[in-house]
Image (cartoon, rainbow, N blue to C red):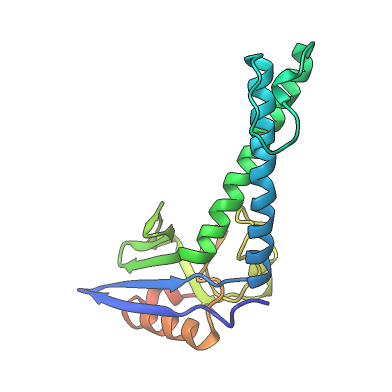
Amino acid sequence: MASQGSKAHIDTIGSDLQIRVRLPIDWFVLIFMSVWLFFWTIGELVALNILIGIVWPVPFDLGFFGFEFGEIIGTGGLVLAFLLIWFLFWTRAGIRAFRALLTMLAGSELIEVNSGGITLSRQIFGIGFPKTYASDKITSLRMMNKEDRQPIRKRSFGRGKDGLAFDHGYDTVTFGEGLKRDAAEEIIRAIGGRFSHYLKGAG
C-alpha cells in the first residue's frame, strides 16, 4: 500500500524557482525493508565474528549464538576469500537497503529551475548530490507517461510512480515521482509561466 501521492512546495527566489517534493512512502516496502534489515544485522554480526575468528584465532563470542565461531580451525585460504567476498557484498546490500529506508522516511527531491537549466537533487535530511541539465538541451517538460516509466533506471525504489519528465538531448529524465496529478500540473504551470522554452515539444 503506497501513499496517495507526494506534496510539492514551490518557492520563488528572484527569477528562479525552487521546488521541494516529499518522496512517497510505500508502506509494504517500508515494513519489508525494516524486517529484512533486522535479519541483515544478525547476518552481518555472524559473518564478522567468523572472519575475526579466522584471521585472529582467539575465541571471540558474541554470547548469544550458543557456540564460538572463533574456534573454527583449519580453514583454507579459499574459504576465507569466499567469506570475505560474501561479507563485502552483504555489507553493500545492507547499506543500500538502509539508504532506501532513510529515503522513504526522510527523503525529498529538490528541483531548482532557472534560465540556465534544471537542477535535480534527491536528498536525505537535506543532503544530496545535485545534477544540472543544461537549458539548451531541455525540451518537452510533461507529465510522466507510460513510455517514460518503461526504461530500467538505476534507482531501485520509487520507480513506476506518476511524476514529471523532460527530454535532455536523446535521454529522458524523470523526477517528482509519486506526485499527485494536480501537484504535477501546478509545477508545470509554474515552470512554464517563467521558462516556457522548457515546454517546447510537449504534447
Q: Quadrant of residue 44?
A: top right
Q: Residue 175 location in percent, x, y?
A: 51, 67
Give the residue at x 51% y 65%: 105
Give the residue at x 64% y 15%: 58
Q: Quadrant of residue 60?
A: top right
Q: Quadrant of residue 74?
A: top right
In the picture as drawn, the residue positioned furthest to the left comes out as 14
Give the residue at x 36% y 60%: 126
For the question of whether residue 199 can be seen, the reply is: yes
For the question of whether residue 191 can be seen, the reply is: no
Give the residue at x 63% y 68%: 148
Along the viewing direction, whichever of 167 and 159 lies nearer the viewer: 159
Q: Residue 18 location in percent, x, y?
A: 32, 71
Q: Residue 140 location in percent, x, y?
A: 51, 73
Where the C terminus falls, by quadrant?
bottom right
The answer to whether residue 157 is left or right of residue 190 is right
Q: Residue 155 location in percent, x, y?
A: 60, 56
Residue 174 versus residue 36 in the image, above or below: below
Along the viewing direction, whichever of 133 and 106 lies nearer the viewer: 106
Residue 163 versus residue 74 in the image, above or below: below
Residue 123 versus residue 189 in the image, above or below: above
Where the N terminus falls, by quadrant?
bottom right
